[in-house]
Each structure stands twice: as C-alpha cells, then as structure tokens.
Amino acid sequence: MSTYGTEEKGELRSNLTKLYQAGRQDFPDRADAVSAVATDVNFLIEDLNGRAAQLGDPAVTQDMLAVCARVADALIRTVKTLNACAEGLVYIADDFVARDEFAQQVFNSLGAELTTGAPAQAPVPQQIDGETLLHEGDGDDYVTSAPPVSPEADADTRNDEYDQAQDGIGFPEEDGS
C-alpha cells in the first residue's frame, strides 16, 4: 500500500484512457450483449405464455412465467445500469479534462473513437409486465386443436389413405421388345 506525500494529499488519480475506453467501448459492448439476451428472454416468454395458455395455464407454467419475467426485468435493469455507468464514466473523464492540464494533454493524445460523441447506448428491450402473463384460465379461448383420435381409428385412417394413394399408381407398360 502506498502513502501519499504532502503535495499529493487531496488528489484523485485516474487513468483517463481507461475511463474513456470503459465509458465508450467496454460498458456499451457489455450492455449490448445483455440487451441481446434480454430480447431473447422476452421472445421465450411470449412463446411460453402461448404454450401455457394452450395447456390451460397450469400452475407450473405460471410459476415459470413469473421466474422468466423476473429474469427479464433484471436483465433490462442491467442494460439501463450499464448505459448509465458508461455515461457517468465519460462525464467523469470529461470533468477531469476540463479541470486538469495534464488530463487535457492526455485527452489530446487519444484517438477520436475515445473522445468524440456521446457514449453508445444499448437498446433497452421492452419491459414485460409479469402480472399480465399470470392469469388462471381453462384454456378454452386458446385451444383450437382437434380432439385426440384413438390409435385404432388413427390406424384405420392411415390404412385407408395409403390404399387410396396406391390406387393411382400404375405399373409401367412392358415393352414388347
């Protein structure tokens, strides 16, 4: 652990390049990755919600939807937090540059990708309201499939279809040569 000398007391030291790199590249990249996962989870929730409705919204699917909605919410909050952190890091670095001559020199030596424009902001996926997903029902509004057919009836139907398909198939004419 190092100690500060008299002339260094009250100073805050930071690596300006790393602040800009984190605020303009690292945090936005991570926010983009989390945003993509959150979007995927939202699509999965929509799919699960439809399948749950077809099953009559049993308790187990409602529990799964509740967990998924909480996961999606946590991912969305993470994207927002990473976006805010990126902005904050650039703001702090800009403040150092505005107040310190040495920081200004470092800033002038950095490339444009670290010094220009606002920090990139990852898209924030749409919030899913877990309460609208969780409702009990008998599934009558959603189930449109035909009633099940007994194996015997199914076998008879398949055999009839096979016989009909065979009726239209002719044998090639024998060549008299």
Image (cartoon, rainbow, N blue to C red):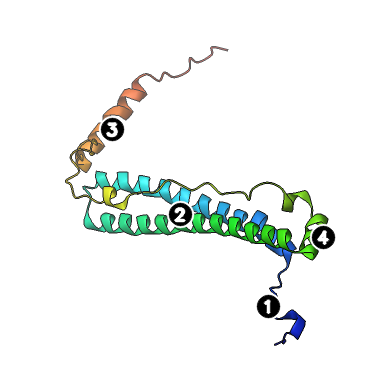
Q: Name the residue under label 4.
A: 105
C-alpha separation, residue under disc 4 versus residue under disc 1: 21 Å
C-alpha separation, residue under disc 4 versus residue under disc 2: 38 Å
Type of amino acid at the residue the image marks with label 1: Gly
Q: Mark 3 points at which residue?
A: 159
Q: Which of marks 2 and 1 is in front?
A: 1
**x, y percent for residue 29:** 62, 54
Which of the pair 125/115 is nearer the observer? Answer: 115
Determine the residue positioned at 63% across, 51% down: 119
Q: Mark 2 points at which residue?
A: 76
Res 21 seen here: no
- Crowd tier of the residue under label 4, counting other residues whose Cα lies within 10 Å: few below 14, some 14–19, many 20 or above: few
C-alpha separation, residue under disc 3 versus residue under disc 2: 54 Å
Type of amino acid at the residue the image marks with label 4: Gln
Left or right relative to 17: residue 37: left
Q: Which of marks 2 and 1 is nearer the N terminus?
A: 1
Q: Earlier in the sequence, mark 4 or mark 3?
A: 4
Q: Mark 1 points at which residue?
A: 10
Type of amino acid at the residue the image marks with label 3: Asn
C-alpha separation, residue under disc 4 versus residue under disc 3: 85 Å
Q: Earlier in the sequence, mark 1 or mark 3?
A: 1
Which of the pair 3/111 is nearer the observer? Answer: 3
C-alpha separation, residue under disc 1 versus residue under disc 3: 90 Å
C-alpha separation, residue under disc 2 versus residue under disc 1: 38 Å
